[in-house]
Amino acid sequence: MPRFLHLNILIILILQNISCAHPSEGLYSYNNTTYHPESLPGDSQQQIYQAQQEYYNVALRLTREAIVERYLAEEAINKKTTVEKLRQQYFPTPATDEKALKEMYKKNKDKIPYSYLLVKGEIKNLLTEQIKAQQTNKLIKQIEREKGAKFLIPKPTPPSTQLKTSGYPVKGPSSAKVTIIEFGDFTCPNCQAAKKPLQSLLKKYGSSTRLIWKYFLLHDKGPSVKLAIKGYCANKQNKFWEFYNLVFNDQMAAMWKSSAKFVKDLKLDKKTFLKCLNDKASEQFVRNSHAEAKNIAISGTPTFFVNGKRVNYSQGIEEALDQAIAEEL
């Protein structure tokens, strides 16, 4: 069976079951009352949304493949050539020479805690995938112009979640139209990598946005917990964002830095800071934040919410957050 016909069958099967992924007419009926996803607990709402998002991503990928295969098949007939020759024309083998690999490593060096030689293979694979994605996007745009191709499956809308914000670090004015909430862990490399795009977006949108940090513990003990508590106590002296910068500027060193060194570097009141660290209420606050995250099906960091809506950033944190913020303004 030709590849494009096989993909078309898959798309038809998906479209026949589209209502399963978008329960706009309700989830179930009970005593003549229809209940929607909003009637479920927060964690259940998030799990349904995640399932919808996974469905959407698979449907999008299969649909894009089907569109490309149909276009190549038609073009092969029109141009009296083969699909394979057209595929080679539109998708030439990516050039991943040593210079390109080293440039990519240099660009992302602050996010990669390994030497170039150790990660060269991974960088080559990543660069190849990026180039292939760019090639596909370029062809899809061409097909959209020439054939009016459109992706008809609606993108799932994340549930709006009411999150506690009192007592948490805030960066930006209370009058901001958009609130970004990040559940993060100070030992998380991806949270460190998110620092730069977050700063870029806060600068771009200015007083229209504010950022709130909430604690999620990747580990139940050790630096994950200790740094979270230190962050909480630094916030008590209005030094959280200085703490945040200090930790993510040298994450590995921060994991083992003494409390006294934090006091010195951040110019904290030593007695107040140490008292806060030893107060059981400090750890409880951090663990309550973690528990809140688990209750809404958060399992990793960083996890972002924009005005209460969870952000899916499979295509990149900055791009996803930028789009989510723009939709709220």
Image (cartoon, grey):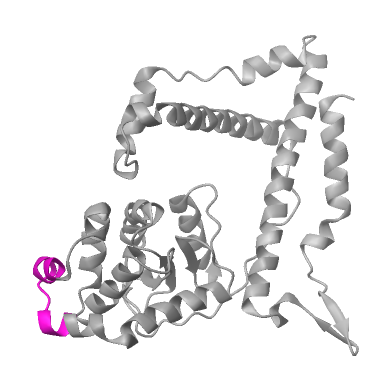
Residue 252 horizontal/vertical position (percent): 26, 53
Q: What number of labels is visible? A: 0
Residue at x-position 44% and y-position 60%: 302
Residue at x-position 70% and y-position 45%: 60
Residue at x-position 86% and y-position 55%: 17
| Residue 269 visible in the shown view | no
Query: Eyeballing the image, is 74 above or below 64?
Result: above
Span highlighted in magenta in the image: 260-273
Query: Which residue is more in the foreground, 78 or 188?
Result: 188
Please give left or right for residue 132 compared with residue 117 in the image: right
Residue 36 horizontal/vertical position (percent): 76, 78
Tell me if residue 41 is in the magenta stretch: no
Which residue is situated farthest in the top direction here? 80
Please give left or right for residue 103 compared with residue 247 in the image: right
Which residue is situated farthest in the front direction here? 221
| Residue 118 visible in the shown view | yes
Classify residue 1 by image quadrant: top right
Residue 28 horizontal/vertical position (percent): 85, 77
Residue at x-position 71% and y-position 46%: 58
Magenta span: chief secondary structure: helix
Query: Eyeballing the image, is 12 above or below 305?
Result: above
Query: Which residue is more in the foreground, 219 or 94?
Result: 219
Query: Eyeballing the image, is 62 above or below 188?
Result: above
Residue 204 horizontal/vertical position (percent): 34, 57
Tell me if residue 267 is in the magenta stretch: yes
